Amino acid sequence: MVGAVAPSSKGLARAMARGADQAGFVIELGAGTGAITRELAQRCRPERLAIVEPDPTAARRLRHLFPHSLILACCAHEAPELFASLPDDALLVSSLPFRSLPDHVIAPTIELLLGVLNHGSRRRLVQYTYHPRAPFDVPHDFKWHRRERVLRNLPPAGIRELTGRA
């Protein structure tokens, strides 16, 4: 399911990928056309980048563009083994449109992400949104931080970072 009228701009992609070069491992959720993936691939080694894209056609295209990275054609919650042994400094980069996904996808995905963040003190989720509020609600011991706003994107996007209680 697509959540935007246009692919992410270079400015949004750069902002989303910021910090990937210091992460022990990066997982991108909902890569779509690969605009953010290109920036991530420039900042980290292919073996430290995994991409989860539920659309099989988009996943095939991403496999062609990024042949040395792991690319899974499924929803994140359908691949818990990918998240099982992440380093403490893992970075999750998400383009998932949480406010428009069906409940049967949202709930298990959020549960998985909160569990991942909860098991690493330096793990974080970077998410962009077109809405003024947080991408999804979290328990009180998790915190969304506003990171920046990218006006040169259609539509303009806000970037938030979620940290856990670990």
Image: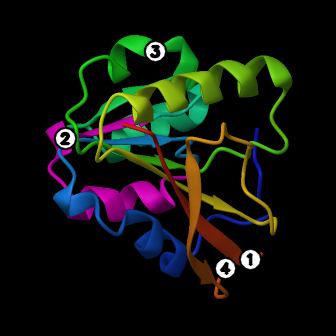
Q: Position of residue 163 (x, y in %)?
A: 46, 49
Tell me the tag on residue 98: none
- Residue shown at 74%/43% (left/top)? 137
Question: Which SS type dominates the magenta stretch?
Answer: helix
Pick the residue in front: 114 or 4: 114
Callout 4: SS: loop
| Stretch of the chain drawn in magenta | 33-51
Residue closest to the far bottom: 152
> In this figure, which residue is indicated by the disc labeled 3?
79
Determine whether, in the image, residue 80 is placed left or right of residue 75: left
Image quarter hosting the C terminus: top left
Asked if disc 1 and disc 4 are in contact, CB closer than 8 Å, the reply is yes
> In this figure, which residue is indicated by the disc labeled 2?
48
How many C-alpha atoms fall within 10 Å of the one at disc 2: few (<14), some, or many (≥20)? some
Callout 2: SS: helix
In the rendered structure, which disc, 1 or 3, sits on the residue that comes first in sequence? 3
In the rendered structure, which disc, 2 or 1, sits on the residue that comes first in sequence? 2
* Marks 2/1: CA–CA distance: 29 Å
Q: Is residue 77 above or below residue 9?
A: above
Callout 1: SS: loop
